[in-house]
Amino acid sequence: MNLQDCIAFAAKNPVCFLATAENDQPHVRAFLFWFADETGFYFETFRPKDVCSQIRANPKVEICFFNHGDLPTAKTLRVRGAAEFLDDLRLKERLIADMPFLKSYGAGPSDPNYQIFRLAHGDAHFWTMADILKEHTLEHVQF
């Protein structure tokens, strides 16, 4: 297993679950994965949303990707690390090109409400039903 395996799995299963925390309370929500490469796993949201204030207060997040197979073939990828916000006009232009439906929510790439964040460094691992009670033996990828 390597980082490219993780990136490929995430790309094939872009609807994921993002966990943040606010004070002592965890918050999990479905999230749409944007892309990943050797620089990290990228996501987008909007500044006014609670998820942004939660990440600002505590950047430690975990994301779970799931392949929605039947139970014997079901597989998850868990990615955790510290999220970092990016304010990069070229990335925002790419975002709008990749996800044109977002145009209806903002005034274009320069709109400050578009918020891109990534996990540039962290830990990732796969899990299947065959791994029950074997979590401590699973291979992890550091990125």
Image (tube, rainbow, N blue to C red):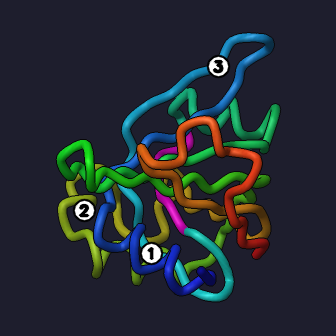
Tell me if 12 is positioned left or right of 20 in this view: left
Secondary structure found at label 2: helix
Q: Amino acid at mark 3?
A: Pro
Which label is found at residue 51? none
- Residue 137 in the magenta stretch? The answer is no
Q: Are marks 1 and 2 in contact (CB under 8 Å)?
A: no
Q: Residue 35 got which mark? A: 1
Q: How far is disc 3 from disc 1 in space, using C-alphas? A: 25 Å
| Residue 72 image offset from top left, x and y in percent | 26, 49
Most foreground residue, 60 or 70? 70
Name the element at disc 3: strand
Provide the residue span drawn in magenta.
Answer: 42-47
Residue at 49 percent across and 69 percent down: it is 110
Residue receiving disc 2? 103
Mark 1 to mark 2 CA distance (whole Å): 18 Å
Q: Is residue 26 above or below residue 57?
A: above
User: Which residue type carries mark 1?
Assistant: Phe
Question: Which residue in the protein does label 3 denote?
Answer: 26
Q: Marks 1 and 3: in contact by CB < 8 Å? A: no
